[in-house]
Amino acid sequence: MDMPVPNAAVLGNKARIVARLLAVLPADAVIADPNETRAYECDALAAYRCAPLAVVLPRTTAEVAAALRVCHDMGVPVVPRGSGTSLAGGAMPTADCVVLGVSRMTAVLETDYPNRFVRVQSGRTNLAVTGAVEGEGFFYAPDPSSQLACAIAGNIAMNSGGAHCLKYGVTTNNLLGVTLVQMDGTVVEIGGAHPDAGGLDLLGLVCGSEGQLGVVTEAVLRILPKPEGARPVLIGFDSSEVAGACVSDIIKAGILPVAIEFMDRLLIEVCEDFAHAGYPDCEALLIIEVEGSDGEIDEQLAAIVGIARRHNPVEVRESRSEAEAKRIWLGRKSAFSAIGRISDYMCLDGTIPVSALPLVLRRIGELGAEHGLRVGNVFHAGDGNMHPLILYDANKPGDLEICEALGAAILKLCVEVGGCLTGEHGVGIEKRDLMGVQFTTADMEAQMRVKDVFDPKWLLNPAKVFPLDISAGRRVG
Amino acid sequence: MRPVNEAELAEAIRGANGPLHIRGGGTRRIGAATGEVLETGGLAGVSLYEPGALTLVAGAGTPLAEVEALLAGERQRLPFEVPDLRGLLGRGGESTLGGVAAANASGPRRVQVGACRDALLGVRFVDGRGDVIKSGGRVMKNVTGYDLVKLLAGSWGTLGVISEVSVKVQAVPEAEATLSAPMAIGPAVAAMAAGLGSPYDLSGAAWCAGAVRLRLEGMAGSVAYRSERLAAHLGGDWQVVTGAASAALWREVRDVLPLQSVDGPEEGLTDGLAGAPVWRVSVKPSDAVALLVGLEGAALLDWGGGLVWYRGAGDLRGRAAALGGHATLVRGAGVAFHPEAPAVACLAAGLRATFDPRGILNTGLMG
């Protein structure tokens, strides 16, 4: 992974930079000791590491603005960080950067049930947003699997999704407003508790901009009343193609499950060994969850099972109780831990048209065989967001490189069939150099011109998203 | 000018030597327009429709009616319930898919499934430099690069001319029902909040012609169950209508029928609404009551109160601003779009300057 050569002038100016930061922030909000900054050297894409020059942990929008003004004046790159759970290297530092972490900004500022929103500081974790409103019967819908740890700031930066976004949408569909601090310290209020943008949809633009347009310090989030109940059905098939066809038929029939999860044989076996969920011995498994009252759930599950039966499933298991529902989800929810126990792995995130599922699953198998690595598939089938897991051995020289090459080949395949490189994890550094597969230079130029408007000096998270040769003329380093 | 493909569109914009007035069907135009007319009607045709993937891709000039008819053939529809505002705005013409996207035109179902921008999967467009640019794609989840799709949605042609639209569609549900009850605006807003805050998954909450209307859609058994539970949850007497009668109630809300002048188009208006300006106001739903207090014009609330249509005299812009919302003058003399806060206006101006450096695309429409 290439990163720009650190700016020597910035590295040599560390003492002054830290002094200026300490002049505008409380002493405990500035970390400059290399023993402590090392804790910020990577995010969840842990294969790549680099300790930053310094770290700041402000508590308010005003402190964020003050820190950014200092860095702006002194030409120091800034890498914003939520909880550091990015799988794409979105929060990975460079040696010449200040990491701006929002982890101390966790307050709930306003809850409004009649208008169904909550206003929070952006360092609050995803699950703690739901925690703040569930007593009144509400929840915040986007549910990335890291929701216990991940911060709203990072969710907004990456436009995070989750298992239930088939029904409720992703972050951008549930975000009403943000307080954004630009690199020069300007504080901008975008959107709010009213539904529509008054002019251009800057909110939609900021969401998913990977911390390159500004630092989000506060967010107005839409909350929803909890459904009366939810129950899954498990359906096993003797081929992935048939499972894919079943998914397509369910969607076309107009049934709207909250989740349709898919696992292939490798994942079924690994999860079964790990969690003993009682999964059937088969090639492909769907877990489909629907919501509502008991009667409504029965009505939807009957329709789903009716469609599934036409595809000759090897097993159909409806949950009749909370315990049965939990058991069905048990294996799926432990998929990543289960795989992690048997091997190192890389998790991909391409999205494809649902109709291309059978072809793509077959080609992934072939590509894996060509590269000599095993690939498991566990993903959100309802919206075509795949998560191929490439198994490799980190201790075997050259294996990571083969894994990366296979990952690139799979993502190119996703684009070829009409899909995209990343459905919910973001580009970061991980997919940065593949952007040219999906976009023309003109497409990327248009995106970079947006960054020129928000951050003319290209100091915010500058070495991400765009291939380095494409962004070279804009970055300092 | 009426380009028939994207290359011609790019050529037309590149070669333009003055302002261009970008027009889809001309059905929902607001504000003043200057410059040579550039129509998108030649960029027509559905290039992909996969009912099993809920995806449709079409040229920007494709008539909305053609798209809706095609979808109806598979018992599908556009989720965001496109308003037909010709009567309200006194316009003619045939709406196009690109025009719908450029205006982010969204109807009552927004409270459940979001606006047009939420269903837009991708766009291709030509910016003011004449560069062809794509963003997004045709898949349901896509975070690859910046979301210029959202930026273009509701940009009213000021950043670029949309040439192709990729959109998520939805199955038509088996059943629908509307609960309605006559109510004054205050209790109406409270009832809508109570309905939207219940677990019964409303797909519409409006106050129209002096009555609250709450819509439920889905499988037949589920709609019947929720109708009963919702009425019990809210208390009071509710009339329940289903099927076509329910759909007719929501067309009335969607197209803002009660605020249309009785004689339709501009000339020869005879009722009390004749000549009165029409405002579209976005506020926090519970602020709808304060927004309208003391005003004597006609009003309709949608989105639980978050969208207020108003026809008549009054300083709606000042009132909306005081409540933290904004007001668009959709019919009448004056500035169409609400002035933005300085920091937001600065970013918007910067974006317009970079996408349209010569300032030729619907010049001055949005600021």
Image (cartoon, rainbow, N blue to C red):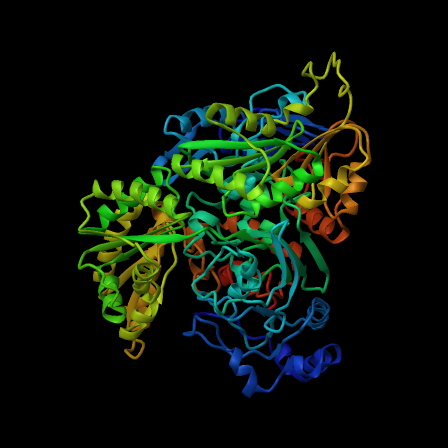
Q: Determine the image quadrant of residue B329.
A: top right
Task: Residue A347 in the image: state x and y as whole percent.
Answer: 36, 64
Residue nearest the observer in this picture, A34 or B317? B317
Identify the residue shown where x is 28% and y is 71%.
A392
Work out whether residue A389 or residue A306 is closer to the camera in this orientation and state it: A306
Residue B229 relative to residue A381: left or right:
right
Name the residue located 71 percent from the left edge and 47 percent from the top edge.
B349
Image-quadrant location for residue A337 = bottom left
Quarter of the image containing the N terminus of chain A?
bottom left
Tell me which residue sits at (66%, 30%) in the image. Answer: B20
Residue B116 lies, in percent from the top left, at: 54, 38
Q: Position of residue A246 (x, y in %)?
A: 27, 44
Query: Could one spot residue B144 in this view of the protein?
Result: yes
Count the numbered circles shown. Answer: 0
Whether residue A458 is situated above or below residue B349 in the rendered picture: below
Task: Report the side of B335 relative to A149 (left or right).
Answer: right
Q: Is residue B115 visible?
A: no
The picture places residue A43, in percent across and down from the top left corner, at 48, 72
**Is B344 rendered above or below residue B299?**
below
Q: Is residue B334 left or right of residue B244?
A: right
Q: Quadrant of the C terminus of chain A?
A: bottom right
Residue furthest out toward the top: B268
Please say if A134 is above or below B176.
Answer: below
